[in-house]
C-alpha cells in the first residue's frame, strides 16, 4: 500500500509553498538558518562536527571504462599549461570573419519574427594577446570528408502532464521498447528522442500507448508474486498515454555550409539541429549513474560517482562540483562550450538527520526548508512480507487542518494525525478512522521510534498522504534554490572560487591528466586507454577536440579619471581617490545620525566606552563630517544624535519595532531633515528593508546605513569612511569623478543612456507575488546621475509592462534638466534577457520607446537615434591567459588572481556569424575565475564602429558611482540591477521571506508598495 491517504473529514492536506527560480545576480542561492549538528534517530543533535570540509573521491576509481580523480579544493595559481607551446589562433577563421564583414555590414538579418543589424566589423584597438577559452572544436563527418550521419528527431507527447522526474522515468521506459532495440538513441528525458536510424512507428507514423508508469527504483526487491489488489488499483490510477511522432531529419552539412558561407542570402535556422547536438553531447552524463541533471545542460556528480566532489556548507547543505556544456554555432564551425559549475544541494541522509542539521526549533522553518524535497521510503511489502517497492515521494509540508482533512492539528504527530481508510486486506472491508502511528504498526508491522515528530504530507493539498519522518531518506542531487546565509556563502566561495588554472584543469586538464569535465562527457580518457569518443560522439557523425581553443584578444587602455583638480591613472582597474576633491561636490543643508540598538546580548550598535584608536560615538561622527568636507561636500547642521532601542529582531516583535522606526522618520519629516545616517547593531535584512521603505517610499528621507562595529573599527577606517563619502556625494546631487572623453564620436552631450532590468519572485515568496521592473536613465553629460522608474508587474514576466510610461518619465526629467531639450541619441543596455528572448526585446520593448518618442518628439524625423545592447552575465564563457605578462599577476609581490588583465576583450573566433557581440572583462577578477560580461547588439541606428562601441562600454565601467574601480558590467545595467534589489526591500514580506502557508497571498490592492518612491527622492540616484 502507498502512504496512507486522508479521506473525507478524517484526511489531511499539506501546505503548498511557492517555488520558482532563485534571486537574480551572481549570488549563490539558498537560505540556511542557525547551526545544527548531526542527529540520531531519537531527534537529538550534536554540534561538534567541523563547519565546512571537502570530500572528494580517492584517486583511481573506474566508471564507464575511464577513470576520474578528485582534485583538492584549493591550490596555487598560475598559467594553465604554462610552459607548453601556445597554438596560434586559426588563421582560416580570422580570414573567414574578415570576408564576412562586407556581407554583414549595413545589412539586417532575420531574428525570429524581426530583424537585427549585422556586424559592422571587429575591434582592433588595444594590445593584442592570445587567450585560451573553455571551448572545444567540433568536427563533423561532413567536414572530415566521411559519409554523413543523418539525425532523426522524434517528439514525445505525454498525457497527462508529468513532473520532470516522472518524464525521465517514462522516457527511460520508452527506450527499452523493442522498437529501439539495436538503435543508437539519445534523449533530453523531457519530450525529444534523437536516433541515427529511423523507427517504425506504425500506421500514421505515430506510436501511441497507454501504460502504467514504472516504479522509480529498479534496484528495489522484485515482487514475489502478484501485488495486493490495492496496489494494482494504485497502478491503474497512474496510467499514462504517450504518443511518439517523427519531427524531421537533420544533417550537419546544412549547418556547416551556412556557418562557412559568405553569401548575403545564406539562411538556416540553426536552433533545431543545435538542440539535437546538445542532447547528443549530454548523453554520457545524462545516462551515467550518480549524476544529477540540474537542467540547462548542467550535471552534478553526487555520492557514489568516482568524480564526486563536495564541500560541507553546514545546516544540512553541501556544495557539489559539476559541469556545463553547450554546442554553439560560430563563424565557420561548431564549438562546444564546457565549464565547471558549483551549486548548493541538500545532503542525502535520513530526513530527520537533515532537519537536525538544519538546526531550527521552529516547525514553520523546518517545513519551509524541506518543502518539495524528494524522499525515499521502503515499507510496502508483498504477501511474503518482503519489501517489493521503493516509494519516492515529494514533501508537500507537514500535516495540518484543511477543508478535506478537518480536525488534523497543524504539526500533529503520528499519534495525533488521524485519517479515514478502507483496509482492503480484510475479507469484508469497512471504512474506519486510525492514526498514522497505528496504521504503520498494524498494516506494515512498523512501530515508529519517534512518534512525537510532525507527520509529513507527501500527497497534495486536497488529497493528502502521510508518511512519518523517520521512514524517509533524502534522495541525492537535489539543488537548494533559496538564498544562502552569509556563512554558507563564505563556505561556498572557498569551494567554488578557484584560480583559473585549477578550473581549466578540472574542465580539460592535460593529456597525462585529463579533466573531469572532458571525462564526464566521454571526450577524453587517461593515457593508453581506449578513446571514449569512439563510442560516445563518433557514432553520431562528429568528433570534438580535447584541448581548449586559443583565441585572439586585446587589452584596452585604461581611461583617465578626472576629479575637481587632478587626474588619476587606474592600475589593474582601480585607483585611489584619497586627498582628492570630488568632481562636483554635493550638498546637505541638514543631516542627522540615527543610532539603532537592539535589546539583548551585544545589541549596542556602538561602543560607548571606546578608547585608544577607537573613537567614541560623537567624536566618530565629527571625524566622518571632517572626511566628507575634505572631499568637498558642503555639510550643514548635524542635528542631535537620536538613539533608539528596538526589541529583538524577530518576527514577533516587528509591529512594535515598526512603530519605533516610524516615529523616528516622522520626527525627521517634522524637522525637514533630508538625510539620515543610520548606525546599525548588525546586518539584518528585515531592518534594512524597513529603513529603506520608510526613507525612500513613505517619508522621502535619504538614508545611508553602516554597521557600528565596522564604522568604529580603527583598521581601514579611512577607507570605510571614504566609501561612505561616495554615497553621501551622489545622493547629495554631486559627481564623484568623470572619465575623460567618454562621449566622443559618434556620441555627444545630447546622448542619454538607459538601463532596464526585471527581478522575479524567488522560492518562498507569497502566492501571486509580482515581478518588479526597473528603468534607470542618465540625466547629465557626465553620465553620473541615474534616477529611475520602478513598479510591480505580473510575476515571472521578463518583458517590461508599462514601459512607455517609464520611458516618458525619464525623458521628462531629462528635459527638465536640459532647459526643455531632449536627447538626440539614446543607448539602452538591457540586463537579464536570455538568448531566446532577444527578439522579444525588439518586438515588445522597442515599440514602447518608439511610442514614447512619438508622444514627446512628434514626427519621426525628430526622433533620437537609438542603439540597444543586451548585457549577459549568466553565461559560461571564460578566458585564460597564456603567459604571465598578460595575467593579473605581480611578479614582485608574488600576488595576483592569474585572470586576464582588466580591459581584456574578445570579439573573434567564438562569436556568431551575423550579430555583433563581444566579451569584455573590464574589472579585476579578485576571487576565482573572472566572468566577462557579454554584450550583444540588437539595434544600432547610431552607426557605431566596433572600436567605438567597445571603448565606450569599457569606459562606462569606470563610471560606477560607489567604487573607485572598474566594475564587471556597465553602470546602466548595474544600476538597473541595484534598483531591482532596492525595490525588493519595499516588498520584503512578500518576496524575501519563506512562506510556509498558502494563506500568504499577495494582493496589489493591500500592498504597502506597488510603484515609485517619494517625490522628494524621485529625481535623485536614491538607491545607491
Image (tube, helix red, strand yellow):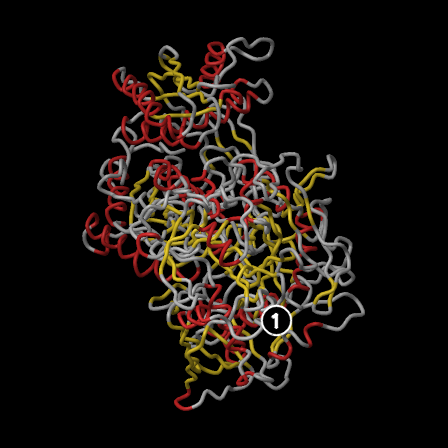
Q: Is residue 751 visible?
A: no
Q: Which residue occupies the extreme bottom position in the image?
A: 203
What residue lies at 53% left-to-right and 8% top-to-bottom?
Answer: 609
What residue lies at 39% left-to-right and 12% top-to-bottom?
Answer: 641
Q: In this rendered view, identify the residue nearer to me: 313 or 854.
A: 313
Mark 1 highlights which residue?
Answer: 138
The answer to whether 853 appears left or right of 52 in the picture is left
Does residue 594 lie above or below 991 as drawn?
above
Does residue 456 lie above or below 508 as drawn?
above
The answer to whether 758 appears left or right of 81 in the picture is left
How many marks are shown on the rendered structure? Answer: 1
Counting from the top left corner in percent of width and height, residue 478 is at 54, 54
Counting from the top left corner in percent of width and height, residue 896 is at 67, 40
Q: Which residue occupies the extreme right position in the image?
A: 528
Does residue 799 lie above or below 609 as drawn?
below
The secondary structure type at the circle numbered 1 is: strand
* Few, some or many residues within 10 Å of mark 1 (<14, 14–19, 20+): some
Counting from the top left corner in percent of width and height, residue 272 is at 46, 74
What residue lies at 36% left-to-right and 62% top-to-bottom?
Answer: 430
Q: Is residue 1002 visible?
A: yes
Counting from the top left corner in percent of width and height, residue 566 is at 51, 27
Q: Find residue 861 and report its image quarter.
A: bottom left
Amino acid at each position: 500500500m502507498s502512504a496512507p491517504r486522508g479521506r473525507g473529514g478524517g484526511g489531511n492536506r499539506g501546505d503548498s509553498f511557492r517555488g520558482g527560480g532563485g534571486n537574480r545576480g551572481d549570488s549563490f542561492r539558498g537560505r540556511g538558518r542557525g547551526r545544527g549538528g548531526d542527529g540520531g534517530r531519537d531527534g537529538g543533535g550534536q554540534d561538534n562536527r567541523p563547519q565546512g570540509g571537502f570530500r572528494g573521491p580517492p584517486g583511481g576509481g573506474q566508471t564507464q571504462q575511464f577513470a576520474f580523480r578528485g582534485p583538492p579544493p584549493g591550490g596555487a595559481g598560475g598559467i594553465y599549461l604554462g610552459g607548453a607551446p601556445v597554438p596560434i589562433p586559426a588563421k582560416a577563421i580570422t580570414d573567414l570573419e574578415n570576408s564576412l564583414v562586407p556581407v554583414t555590414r549595413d545589412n539586417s538579418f532575420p531574428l525570429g519574427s524581426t530583424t537585427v543589424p549585422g556586424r559592422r566589423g571587429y575591434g582592433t584597438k588595444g594590445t593584442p594577446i592570445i587567450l585560451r577559452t573553455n571551448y572545444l572544436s567540433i568536427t563533423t563527418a561532413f567536414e572530415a570528408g566521411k559519409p554523413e550521419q543523418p539525425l532523426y528527431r522524434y517528439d514525445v507527447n505525454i498525457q497527462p502532464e508529468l513532473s520532470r522526474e516522472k518524464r525521465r522515468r517514462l522516457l527511460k521506459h520508452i527506450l527499452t521498447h523493442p522498437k529501439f532495440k539495436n538503435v543508437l538513441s539519445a534523449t533530453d528525458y523531457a519530450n525529444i528522442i534523437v536516433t541515427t536510424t529511423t523507427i517504425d512507428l506504425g500506421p500514421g507514423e505515430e506510436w501511441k500507448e497507454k501504460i502504467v508508469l514504472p516504479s522509480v527504483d529498479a534496484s528495489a526487491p522484485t515482487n514475489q508474486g502478484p501485488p495486493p489488489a490495492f496496489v494494482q488499483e494504485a497502478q491503474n490510477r497512474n496510467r499514462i498515454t504517450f504518443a511518439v511522432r517523427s519531427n524531421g531529419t537533420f544533417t550537419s552539412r546544412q549547418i556547416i555550409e551556412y556557418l562557412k558561407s559568405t553569401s548575403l542570402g545564406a539562411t538556416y535556422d540553426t536552433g533545431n539541429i543545435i538542440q539535437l547536438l546538445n542532447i547528443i553531447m549530454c548523453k554520457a552524463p545524462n545516462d551515467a549513474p550518480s549524476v544529477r541533471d540540474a537542467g540547462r545542460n548542467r550535471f552534478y556528480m553526487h555520492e557514489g560517482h568516482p568524480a564526486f566532489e563536495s564541500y560541507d556548507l553546514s545546516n544540512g547543505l553541501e556544495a557539489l562540483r559539476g559541469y556545463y556544456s553547450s554546442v554553439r554555432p560560430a563563424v565557420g564551425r561548431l564549438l562546444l562550450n564546457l565549464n565547471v559549475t558549483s551549486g548548493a544541494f541538500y545532503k542525502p541522509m535520513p530526513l530527520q538527520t537533515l532537519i537536525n542539521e538544519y538546526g531550527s526549533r521552529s516547525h514553520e522553518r523546518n517545513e519551509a526548508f524541506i518543502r518539495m524535497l524528494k524522499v525515499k521510503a521502503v515499507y510496502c511489502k508483498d504477501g511474503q512480507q518482503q519489501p517489493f517497492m521503493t516509494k519516492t515521494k515529494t514533501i508537500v509540508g507537514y500535516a495540518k487542518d484543511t477543508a478535506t482533512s478537518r480536525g488534523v492539528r497543524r504539526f500533529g504527530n503520528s499519534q495525533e494525525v488521524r485519517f479515514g481508510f478502507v483496509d482492503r486486506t480484510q475479507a469484508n472491508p469497512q471504512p474506519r478512522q486510525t492514526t498514522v502511528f497505528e496504521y504503520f504498526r498494524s498494516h506494515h508491522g512498523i512501530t515508529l521510534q519517534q512518534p512525537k515528530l510532525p507527520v509529513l504530507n507527501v500527497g497534495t493539498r486536497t488529497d493528502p498522504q502521510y508518511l512519518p519522518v523517520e521512514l524517509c531518506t533524502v534522495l541525492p542531487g537535489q539543488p537548494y534554490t533559496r538564498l544562502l546565509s552569509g556563512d554558507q556563502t563564505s563556505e561556498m566561495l572557498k569551494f567554488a572560487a578557484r584560480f583559473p588554472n585549477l578550473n581549466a584543469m578540472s574542465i580539460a586538464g592535460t593529456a597525462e591528466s585529463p579533466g573531469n569535465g572532458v571525462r564526464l562527457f566521454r571526450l577524453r580518457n587517461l593515457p593508453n586507454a581506449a578513446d571514449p569518443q569512439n563510442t560516445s560522439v563518433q557514432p553520431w557523425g562528429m568528433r570534438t577536440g580535447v584541448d581548449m581553443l586559443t583565441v585572439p584578444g586585446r587589452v584596452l587602455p585604461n581611461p583617465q579619471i578626472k576629479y575637481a583638480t587632478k587626474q588619476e591613472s587606474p592600475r589593474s582597474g582601480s585607483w585611489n581617490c584619497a586627498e582628492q576633491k570630488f568632481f562636483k561636490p554635493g550638498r546637505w543643508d541638514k543631516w542627522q545620525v540615527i543610532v539603532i540598538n537592539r535589546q539583548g546580548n551585544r545589541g549596542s550598535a556602538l561602543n560607548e566606552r571606546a578608547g585608544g584608536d577607537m573613537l567614541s560615538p560623537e567624536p566618530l561622527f565629527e571625524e566622518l563630517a571632517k572626511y566628507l568636507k575634505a572631499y568637498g561636500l558642503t555639510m550643514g547642521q548635524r542635528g542631535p544624535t537620536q538613539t533608539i532601542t528596538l526589541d529583538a529582531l524577530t518576527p514577533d516583535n516587528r509591529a512594535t519595532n515598526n512603530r519605533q522606526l516610524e516615529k523616528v522618520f516622522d520626527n525627521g519629516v517634522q524637522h525637514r531633515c533630508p538625510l539620515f545616517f543610520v548606525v546599525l547593531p548588525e546586518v539584518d535584512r528585515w531592518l534594512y528593508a524597513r529603513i529603506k521603505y520608510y526613507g525612500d517610499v513613505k517619508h522621502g528621507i535619504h538614508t545611508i546605513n553602516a554597521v557600528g562595529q565596522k564604522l568604529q573599527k580603527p583598521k581601514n577606517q579611512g577607507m570605510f569612511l571614504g566609501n561612505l563619502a561616495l554615497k553621501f556625494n551622489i545622493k547629495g546631487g554631486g559627481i564623484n569623478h568623470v572619465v575623460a572623453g567618454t562621449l566622443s564620436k559618434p556620441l555627444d552631450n545630447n546622448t542619454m543612456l538607459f538601463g532596464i532590468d526585471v527581478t522575479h519572485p524567488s522560492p518562498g515568496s507569497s502566492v501571486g507575488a509580482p515581478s518588479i521592473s526597473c528603468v534607470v536613465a542618465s540625466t547629465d553629460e557626465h553620465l553620473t546621475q541615474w534616477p529611475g522608474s520602478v513598479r510591480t508587474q505580473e510575476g515571472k514576466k521578463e518583458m517590461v509592462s508599462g514601459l512607455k510610461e517609464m520611458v516618458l518619465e525619464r525623458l521628462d526629467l531629462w528635459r527638465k534638466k536640459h532647459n526643455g531639450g531632449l536627447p538626440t541619441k539614446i543607448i539602452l543596455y538591457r540586463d537579464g534577457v536570455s538568448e531566446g528572448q532577444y527578439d522579444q526585446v525588439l518586438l515588445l520593448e522597442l515599440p514602447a520607446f518608439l511610442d514614447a518618442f512619438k508622444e514627446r518628439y512628434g514626427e519621426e524625423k525628430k526622433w533620437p537615434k537609438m542603439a540597444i545592447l543586451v548585457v549577459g552575465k549568466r553565461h559560461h564563457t571564460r578566458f585564460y591567459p597564456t603567459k604571465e605578462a598578460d595575467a593579473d599577476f605581480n611578479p614582485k609581490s608574488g600576488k595576483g588572481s592569474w585572470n586576464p588583465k582588466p580591459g581584456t576583450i574578445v570579439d573573434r573566433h567564438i562569436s556568431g556569424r551575423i550579430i555583433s557581440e563581444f566579451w569584455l572583462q573590464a574589472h579585476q577578477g579578485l576571487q576565482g575565475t573572472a566572468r566577462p560580461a557579454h554584450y550583444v547588439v540588437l539595434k544600432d541606428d547610431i552607426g557605431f564602429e566596433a572600436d567605438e562601441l567597445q571603448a565606450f562600454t569599457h569606459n562606462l565601467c569606470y563610471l560606477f558611482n560607489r567604487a573607485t574601480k572598474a566594475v564587471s558590467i556597465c553602470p546602466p545595467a548595474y544600476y538597473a540591477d541595484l534598483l531591482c534589489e532596492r525595490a525588493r526591500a519595499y516588498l520584503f514580506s512578500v518576496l524575501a521571506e519563506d512562506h510556509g502557508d498558502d494563506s500568504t497571498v499577495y494582493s496589489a490592492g493591500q500592498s504597502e508598495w506597488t510603484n515609485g518612491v517619494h517625490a522628494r527622492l524621485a529625481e535623485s540616484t536614491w538607491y545607491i
